[in-house]
Amino acid sequence: MSHARRTAGAAIDDASAQGRRALVIYLPVGYPDVDTSIEAARTAVAAGADIIELGLPYSDPGMDGPLVAAAAQQALDGGVRIADVMRAVEEVAATGAAVLVMTYYNPVLRYGVERFAREIAEAGGAGLITPDLIPDEAGEWIAAADAHGLDKVFLVAPSSTSERLELTAHASRGFVYAASTMGVTGVRAAIGAHAEALVSRTRAAGAERVCVGIGVSDAQQAAEVAGYADGVIVGSAAVRALGSAAGAEGLDALRTLVEDLADGVRQGTVAS
Amino acid sequence: MTETSGPGGTAPLRAATGPYFGDYGGRFVPEALIAALDDLSVAWDKARVDPTFALELSTLARDYTGRPSPITEVPRFARSAGGVRIVLKREDLNHTGSHKINNVLGQALLTKRIGKTRVIAETGAGQHGVATATAAALFGLECTVYMGEEDTRRQALNVARMRLLGAEVVPVTSGSRTLKDAINEAFRDWVTNVETTNYVFGTVAGPHPFPALVRDLQKVIGEEARAQMLERFDALPDAVVACVGGGSNAMGIFHAFLDDADVALIGCEAAGDGMDTERHAATISKGVPGVLHGAKSYLLQDEDGQTIESHSISAGLDYPGVGPEHAWLADLGRASYRGISDAEAMEAFALLSRTEGIIPAIESAHALAGALTLGRELVDGGADPAQTTILVSLSGRGDKDVETAIDWFGLTGNGGPGLRGADEEADG
Ligand SMILES: Cc1ncc(COP(=O)(O)O)c(C=O)c1O
């Protein structure tokens, strides 16, 4: 079945029309198992997430810290396949949230870039976030995404030069993902001071929407980031909450976290 | 893809500098690393044409590494290769015991030039880790080496050497706990500490500029060997044989011969339990193109693009990827690649030890085994053994592998007879 696809841009714009910032929640498919991960994503949507990033577990997740890497490994050990990710996209998109798939490039390349794009679109997915694919190398993905009207979310980092910010801003559709700090995913006590400057530099380079991720883990940090970014991305903390207990208790912990974060992204705009 | 000569192109193969080698190579890394890779590329482009840098490097090569390394003819070993002439390029005689030091001294000099104070490295067999720790000690740099937990066990001697040299060794417990996971962990460190830290990559894989940079620092092997062959035998070899993990000693010795069309170039990949089994590390022979550790190249992967764990008795060859320049040379047909099983490698390991008094690294023993087979093939095909020469890259020495040899050959106990080959009469 095919849905009216919700794009990341629409989700962010609707949030700002409501006077708040968008909340983006990352969850790897297959952690702790495929059905629970889908249930977790639905729970996050019900608790206030505007965009769901479904992680495609990969054997060599070079951008991920121990929390997400261990979750991905558990998912792979459980036998998760790309077909499961496509099913998760379809089921989560049915909630009405925008659904992006966060994936390293090799699984897409091996599956077939055009085939991957087509199946994401057919499942009602918004597009892809590609942490190890820079626009310079992304010709094939960009062509496939354009052909299927998919979001292309590329990353920028505090070390990005102005030229690279421009290149990335222009290659992206949906939003630009600003990495708050130099480093891998994980839960951090404080969001890097670089993040705010990076967001304004990325806007100045032509980005329509900029969301900040990596390290954001509680409502206070979410509020802080919501003071300057269009969206707040939370990954490791969501994975940690879901993994804190088995079954319904893990889902409850996730719900509580996302509700808190959703409050945070509201406060941020008020405060700023 | 305009930077290299393609099939039918007119540019010499030796002129390829990346970022692409045909369809392979590139930079499939997080944006956060691009600035550091750009800095490194710029620094290298300057250094490689800077006479001061060249002098610093060649002085270190002579006074510290002990270059040029000699070539050694091994006639007693070569009897098992149909009687062809076999000549070894002796990288095992370098300080620290392998070719890895050539790369590391250059990258350590470069680290100084870009003003960084800390180096990190991945290591499989431990040779690249030992070399990096050595260079860090020599240059007063802080050093952290990532090593798969499985490999810290296989190569305990090298772990101790690194720590003696002042380096921190971090056992990596993620994934398959071998070289590929050590590389992931090193990239994670680099992206976090890139302001102070340079990643001294150990082979001709990884994102640009590493394949070209490491190749440039290793090509001295082939340049010396080519001149030494001409001087001693007045002829180029018929074939050059090297083992291929990531591919640095092989690119190093192949490079000078790339445009000598009559010289066959043969890379020996680890076939582990055998090419017809699932347990091997024969990336080019058995893999398909994909992206791993920042570059497009051949790769052992499943239908979903998940990396398949490799298997080899040799920690230094136990890697599911391979450098992009090898992938390109394989597609062009300029170099060919074959699998050597654990058993074949260990047989060659023992044979060189007892016929020539040289204990090779198990990695290098794969090249030796390849030379044995190739020699017999050439003679069976009608070549005159007296007129046939094979040059082998003896990339390292076997001290680190004695534990493995004790297990493989059952050398336990308090003494006993020397090893003899099954079909070998006591000779000489
Ligand atoms: C002696 C020796 N030879 C070969 C290798 C394989 O590396 P490469 O293929 O980059 O030469 C290693 C790696 O550890 C090694 O120690």
Image (cartoon, coloured by chain):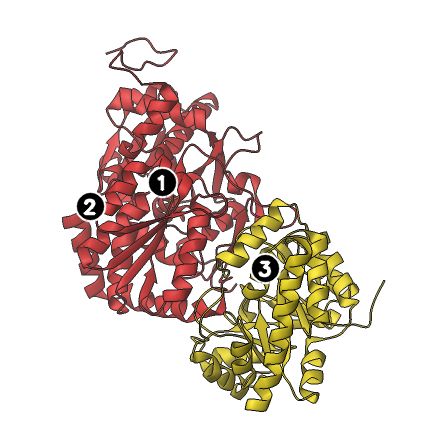
Q: Which mark is residue B195?
A: none
- Which circle's residue, 1 or 2, is located before the other in the chain? 2
Q: Which chain is red?
A: B
Residue situated in front as seen by the camera: A20 or B131: A20
Q: Residue at x 71, y 84 (%)?
A: A14
Judged by depth in the image, the label closer to the viewer, 3 or 2, is 3
Q: Give percent across and percent down for residue B42.
A: 35, 70
Name the image quarter holding the C terminus of chain B.
top left
Q: Which residue is mark 3?
A: A105
Q: Which chain is yellow?
A: A
Q: Is residue B116 above or below residue A268?
A: above
For disc 1, the chain is: B
At label 1, counting other C-alpha atoms closer than 10 Å, the crowd grade (few under 14, some 14-19, many 20 or more) is many
Residue situated in front as seen by the camera: B55 or A111: A111
- CB of residue at label 3: within 8 Å of ligand 1? no
Residue situated in front as seen by the camera: B60 or B73: B60
* SS at badge 2: loop
Q: Give percent across and percent down for residue A272.
A: 54, 91
Whether tag 3 and tag 1 are in contact, CB under 8 A, the answer is no
Residue B22 falls left or right of residue B239? right
Residue B59 falls left or right of residue A166? left
Please, which residue is most extreme toward the top here?
B425
At label 3, counting other C-alpha atoms closer than 10 Å, the crowd grade (few under 14, some 14-19, many 20 or more) is many
At label 2, counting other C-alpha atoms closer than 10 Å, the crowd grade (few under 14, some 14-19, many 20 or more) is many
Residue situated in front as seen by the camera: A74 or B409: A74
Q: Are marks 3 and 2 on the same chain?
A: no
Q: Which residue is mark 1?
A: B152
For disc 3, the chain is: A
Q: Give percent across and percent down for residue B112.
A: 24, 65
Q: Residue at x 28, y 67 (%)?
A: B116
Q: Amino acid at mark 2?
A: Arg
